[in-house]
Image (cartoon, rainbow, N blue to C red):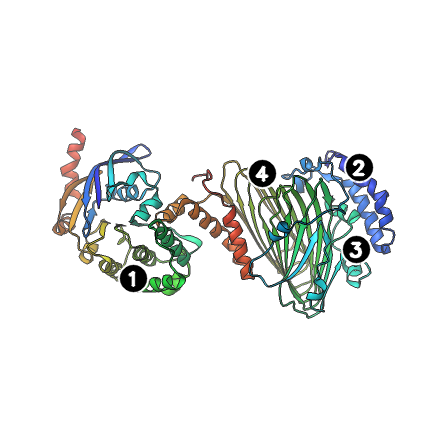
Amino acid sequence: MAKQVSTPLYQQLLDRFDGGLAIAQQAEPAFLKNARLQAQDSFRNLGFPSTRVEDWKYTNIAPFLKNNYSLDHEHAVLHENTLDAAIIEGLDCYKLVLLNGKLMATGYKEQLPSFIKIRPMAEAKEEAGFQKYFGKQIELEKYHLAALNTASFSDGFFIEVNANANLDKPLHIVHTFSADKDLFVQPRHLIIAHRGASLDVIESVVSDNNAAKMFVNSLSEVVVEENANVNHYVLQTAQEGLRLISHTEVSQKRDSVYSNYTFSLPSAELLRNNLHINLDSEHTESHLYGLYLGADHQLVDNHTFMNHRLAHCESNEIYKGVLLENATGVFNGKVYVHQDAQKTNAFQQNNNLLLSTKATINSKPQLEIFADDVKCSHGSTIGQLSQEALFYLQSRGISEDSARALLVTAFAFDVTEKIKIPELEVYINKLINHHIPANQEMIKI
Amino acid sequence: MLSIKNLHAEIEEKKILKGISLDIKPGEVHAIMGPNGSGKSTLSSVLAGRENYTVTEGEVLFEGKDLLDMAPEVRAREGLFLAFQYPVEIPGVSNINFLRTALNEIREYRGLPALEAKEFLKLTKDRQKLVEFDTKLINRSLNEGFSGGEKKRNEILQLAMLEPKLSILDETDSGLDIDALRIVSNGVNKLRNEHNAFVIITHYQRLLEYIVPDYVHVLYNGRIVKSGTKELALELEEKGYDWLKESYSETESVK
């Protein structure tokens, strides 16, 4: 049992499986009920992962499970300034707002074109798309928190874009989290882009600055059908009290393009992103761009998994990390090339800047290649700001703080330049600048 | 404008500058020559405020203010400029953004408002012509992938933009072909006026044919061992630096 974290929360959750939850789930379709039962078994076996589990070696979630979390969040109130934190200046977009994983009725149906369908997850269970795609990709017996989510999620969003439809503006989904007592939430989402559809989604994660702690175990599934194109932006800017485990399971069909841009910024205590891309057909293209900027005592962990199942697929991954103060970063990039995945091109790069003597980074590229005719590369670096570059900028009248911010922005440029929405790029660069603190004691080379 | 008195400096406890004194007035161009390892680049680094050098003795006044007391960016804002021997490549910082940031921080220090985008572009265009700087390069990352000549021209472009009172050109001529040398020199000559001053640090006399100095100083073993006018540069070109070693290494060993 050493691979499990021992916590009263575990028992509390198991009790729910058989109690109130079972009643609530009675009306659900049979396939979902089966999936839930299977997931319950998995979680019962797996429990919460300890650092003895390889995938959690550098991320100890035990301290975050000690709170006496409430599993009920009916009384949450959304604060206006929490929502404001997610505003991207000048961006023309469609907007959805969720509070603690539940869609808020803010007239989203009226503003959206008819070719895009949006439902609360709780009301989507009869949808053909839901029945076809829900839970098809995730290996529940391997992923502790995905199993727990599947067993006991109650709500989230369901989005379906019709074939050949092109959403003219980005869809900005704002996940807000708010609680006045410690809370455990499990949102579940599903995005389906049908054949030839194209969609830009921006997901912002923000939270109230309350003393209450919120543990969010979120699971999203994204289906990118033949020839569809999805740009998926994730911006994590929540406050300190948030502990977020976010699992995103993507499946791609032939000729599809999926691009994920994940920005993990201060101040959530724990950010753990599991991003899995399953290439289920030939001729797909995937881009994973990530930037994590950790400050204070943040623990920011990005685990990506590029699952090359079939031939002629291309994946490209760049993750950049900047660690300040006492922050800890983890990057684990797994690329798995199956025997059938000949002619795979898989590229991965992870670069890190350590800007404080107390910050930590654990970077682990992980390539497993079983095909013999592939091009795969990976690289990982950890470094500090160049003193020579700092001096050069200062010698032109630029203050040390501005010079440092310029250099960090430049370091992040490989990722930020990939953002296809100019307003979003400006927003991200502003956030980066904002978080590069003045007069910090920096490591000198 | 600049007054150096008995300047001693060392790096990692190795003494490099051993008592330099020099006075520079507005409108003057001083050339500092000398063999490798004589302390030329150390002098420019100490003046610009590079961190790894320690000044152990002496003082430097810039327009009456203690230069050594200022952070590198303050020296720049006060009007000191160092054209680097090896300009740094900074991927991801665009040349134009860098210039705007630098110019506006300097203007702010001097109590001037930031330049409007239009004015800034006009100024940039104007100064670009001065050093025949390719417009394509202005939008590229700072010095990234620039040729040696392009980097040096970029230094002079920055000089032209920031309009310093005192410019130190640290071996700006090294590695330049004759065309680049001509362009860089022309730029400097056009920027020369009675209010500013230049210190040209060079190993070779060649540059001084284009930028004619008022004074030439020979630096050897951390000291200025000889000062004169532009004819001294020609003499050095003819005789090389070996005679210095004979004349001055003895005094060193006696000491």
- Secondary structure beneath dot 4 equals loop
Q: Which residue is mark 2?
A: A11
- Image position, residue B211 (x, y; %): 20, 56
Tell me the kind of residue under disc 4: His
Q: Are marks 3 and 1 in contact (CB under 8 Å)?
A: no
Q: In the figure, is residue B202 to the left or right of A146?
A: left
* Front-lying residue, A292 or B221: A292
> Which chain is disc 1 placed on?
B
Mark 1 and mark 4 on one chain: no
- Label annotation for residue A297: 4
Regarding residue A321, the answer to whether it shows in the image is yes
In the depicted structure, whether residue A186 falls above or below residue B188: above
The percent coordinates of residue A319 (x first, y second) are 56, 51
Which kind of residue does numbered mark 3 sit on?
Answer: Ala
Q: Nearer the viewer, mark 3 or mark 1?
A: 3
Q: Which mark is residue A122?
A: 3
Pick the front one: B163 or B38: B163
Report the side of A196 relative to B234 (left or right).
right
